[in-house]
Amino acid sequence: MTENTPRPVDPLDPFTFVLHGSSGDLSRRKILPALAHLAAEGHFRPESRIILAQRQAATPGQALAQEDAFLAEIGDESARKSLSALQPHLGTAALALGEPDAQASLDRAVAGKPEPVVHYAALPASRFIDLMALINGPRDPARLRVVLEKPLGYSGKDSRRIEDVVAQHLDECQVYRIDHYLGKQAVQNLVALRLGNLIFEPLLNREHVAQVQITIAEDLGVEDRAASYEQSGALRDMVQSHMLQLVATLAMDPPISLDADALRDEKLKVLRALKVPRVGARDSDVVIGQYVAGHMNGRPVPGYQQEDGVPPRSLTESFVALKTEVNNWRWAGVPFLLRTGKRMPMRLAEIVVQFREVPLQLFTPLGGQWTGNRLVVSLQPEDSLQLHLLAKVPGQRDCLQPVALNLDFSDAWRIPVRDAYERLLGDILRGRLSLFLRRDEVAAQWAFVDQLRDELQERAARPLAYPAGSYGPPESTSLAFRAGGAWSESLKLAGE
Amino acid sequence: MTENTPRPVDPLDPFTFVLHGSSGDLSRRKILPALAHLAAEGHFRPESRIILAQRQAATPGQALAQEDAFLAEIGDESARKSLSALQPHLGTAALALGEPDAQASLDRAVAGKPEPVVHYAALPASRFIDLMALINGPRDPARLRVVLEKPLGYSGKDSRRIEDVVAQHLDECQVYRIDHYLGKQAVQNLVALRLGNLIFEPLLNREHVAQVQITIAEDLGVEDRAASYEQSGALRDMVQSHMLQLVATLAMDPPISLDADALRDEKLKVLRALKVPRVGARDSDVVIGQYVAGHMNGRPVPGYQQEDGVPPRSLTESFVALKTEVNNWRWAGVPFLLRTGKRMPMRLAEIVVQFREVPLQLFTPLGGQWTGNRLVVSLQPEDSLQLHLLAKVPGQRDCLQPVALNLDFSDAWRIPVRDAYERLLGDILRGRLSLFLRRDEVAAQWAFVDQLRDELQERAARPLAYPAGSYGPPESTSLAFRAGGAWSESLKLAGE
């Protein structure tokens, strides 16, 4: 492994960062800690300002104390240590979006402060339009940027309505649409491995790949998010952005550069080439599910419909498994299996590229089945990459056994792998758009999800029950089987 | 990594093993320890016999005591522990090859013992013909086998003379020609990785490989081997078998099976396709060298011509570097750089497959030069495989740095990686020929070396001086440079 040398910090030019919705969960859990780490690492010049905008007025001291208490509660001691580094940059603003004095409050808050002014909308999509009404700045990304958190609405139509308003106020190059999965080390390394190395690109195509699986499994249930989850469900919550972006990142052709538009042009081509899964009573390419009472780690847990805030006969899916294909020259015919759900046995996010079997296997398997070669990109619980091979067991016989070559990022460089938001905020403040979604990408993602939802509705598909603590309805297993394989956890049980 | 489970031992059918030259260095250092380990692991049935044949008579007890003393001297405690397991199988025979009573002694020694009878010729090639005169057994590999140690003569003509005699007494399928490099775990795993996995085979060709380097570096000088080394030199000692076999193993096409002839047919095709290096005053494809006085680990050491037993104006090469090519559809134009020498800075044997650069590098190198992707098969000092990649350094910037994915065999299975001879003896006793050389392979290897030697002679090439403790004459560096690269140790210095 490479010896780690301390890297010089490249401080950001001065900026004003307005955090809208600064008392919300996302701000407290992710954005403020990421800002604190950046400040503590010396990325901010003294004149840079961070303004916490929220409905209730608070002093910077109060806001910091609240954040510190919150971090103590969730046990983020590392962020607590960095928090004081924010103090010299911090201001607050009482700002009630949609109220008549909002404009004046906001103007006052940013008056005379350094540019660019970055508005970070850590808000529900329903408030984006109210925020946009206040954005009257120049159409110049060097002076004004806006960051939008997902979900951008709950359908393509809804998203279009918001985006049309955004476009009235801003040029596309001023808009940073976040999908924080793109800030994860493993996802960035997937791009780096593909494009920085010779050996992967010749293998990532229909000739050598049997199947791609993407799983985002949550062990949690709906928790206190019932109200918003009832509006989305697994398909809109997870598939619409995170999962389709992972497909696009894995499947895209090499771009002509790493510039934002070059990269996003390639991803867009993949998103537009996605085949909408066929919905049917039998041999359906999509399975939706809803968890019923079950067990997690031996402890009984309630079903979805028994959770606080969920209506008793809810038809919201808490699980979806689907098969799609990337209908282009490179990937046609290769199943892309996507699966996500709540109350699955573990918290896990991974991309598994399952390569084809060798055309002729000359060696003898030593117990168990062959599992073939796999490239596994793990995003959760840890960022890592693994290459699963078969190698010869030492000794007298010519038997092969699975081994994994590991690339663990924190190990490799002995520097902590920080949360995705730290990287993404750094990019926003530097004006780098590559890790953010373009409007046409979001639209293509919605087109896929909307069409699939229409199909489901037309066929009156209802979520199938699965016990909490399981891998979803058994129909999900059949779906993988029909696509020529098994979900990766069963390969692990058999082969490793 | 895979959990290790103890593997059941598959005992060998009864046999009689006659070790000719049992008091020689090879027998004492390698063969007797390997037999002892096999016995201690339970591979031998009680009725199996091991007969130590040597000129001076000794009892089995004396022979064991001598071996124990030798192992203590060289510090092989592991073999000493196993040694007593040989005792129940052991016999001795006083046998003076070439003497009139040799036949009677040998017949007496094996009379009534179990078949197959395996004659292991741990002898100088000059004695092979004397041994062959005594072999009058059936032309049936189930009843009689003969093991020949390299060198099989000192030229193609010499080898042919011996082989003609061998062929008068034995069928090809009874002859086990040893190149112990083929018994090494890393070499066997090279075959396993290539043929047991999908992902390497599509990359191992002229489209993706820039260069192949094979280095066998010895830190030792000629030691007490001057007499035999003067007859061979680096070209015949190392290139003729070990290095050309490594080329063949790496470059061969996938065989139709792992059976001996299927495998050897493919290797033979490579050996016959080798381009003989061009010898010239300038831009020569071959560099020969001879070490002069220098330093090893800070200690002064004498030059080759000052070593005991070396004539003062010797022209024997102790170093050779050459560029060849495998002139077939798969490899044409890819330089295969071979290099071996004595008194180099370290003991090292490795195959380095240097892949081409990516066609378009989108990332920024972080210091140092790009080194591209490399597959490194290490045979010495440890058996291991490494895949060298570039991966993204965590943090704010899109920089790549080299990382190595490691497959360390003893680590992977938590079982000791034993010496190559243990595996090879097991194969001989099981009647498996795959890891042994066929006569036509040896002939093709000699054809390459003889032609090269003829060229060198014709051009009156003399070895260039290099100081002990260096990587050879500077002309070796130019040779690698003209082939489009640098020797692997300089990549390591720059990139890792």
Image (cartoon, coloured by chain):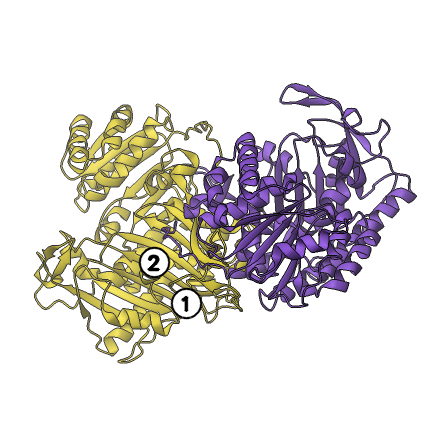
Chain colours: A yellow, B purple
Dot 1 falls on which chain? A
Q: Nearer the viewer, mark 2 or mark 1?
A: 2
- Spatial separation of the CA atoms under disc 2 and disc 1: 28 Å
Q: Amino acid at mark 1?
A: Leu
Given residues B74 and A138, the one toward you in this image is: B74
Q: Is residue A65 visible?
A: yes
Q: Position of residue A420 (x, y in %)?
A: 34, 43
Going 67% across and 67% down the picture, which residue do you hit? B138
Q: Position of residue A322 (x, y in %)?
A: 32, 68
Secondary structure under the numbered disc 2 in the rendered image: helix
Given residues A144 and B58, the one toward you in this image is: B58
Which quadrant would residue A97 be assigned to in this image? top left
Going 26% across and 72% down the picture, which residue do you hit? A475
Q: Position of residue B114 (x, y in %)?
A: 55, 61
Q: Is residue A401 left or right of residue B423?
A: left
Q: Is residue A199 visible?
A: no
Given residues B35 and B327, the one toward you in this image is: B35
Q: Amino acid at mark 2?
A: Lys
Q: Earlier in the sequence, mark 2 or mark 1?
A: 1
Q: Is residue A155 left or right of residue A304?
A: right
Same chain assignment for discs 2 and 1:
yes
Q: Name the residue tied to disc 1.
A: A274
Q: Name the residue tied to disc 2.
A: A492
Count of numbered marks: 2
Image position of A391 with respect to B84: above or below:
below
The quadrant the C terminus of chain A occupies is bottom left
Going 68% across and 27% down the picture, which residue do you hit? B469
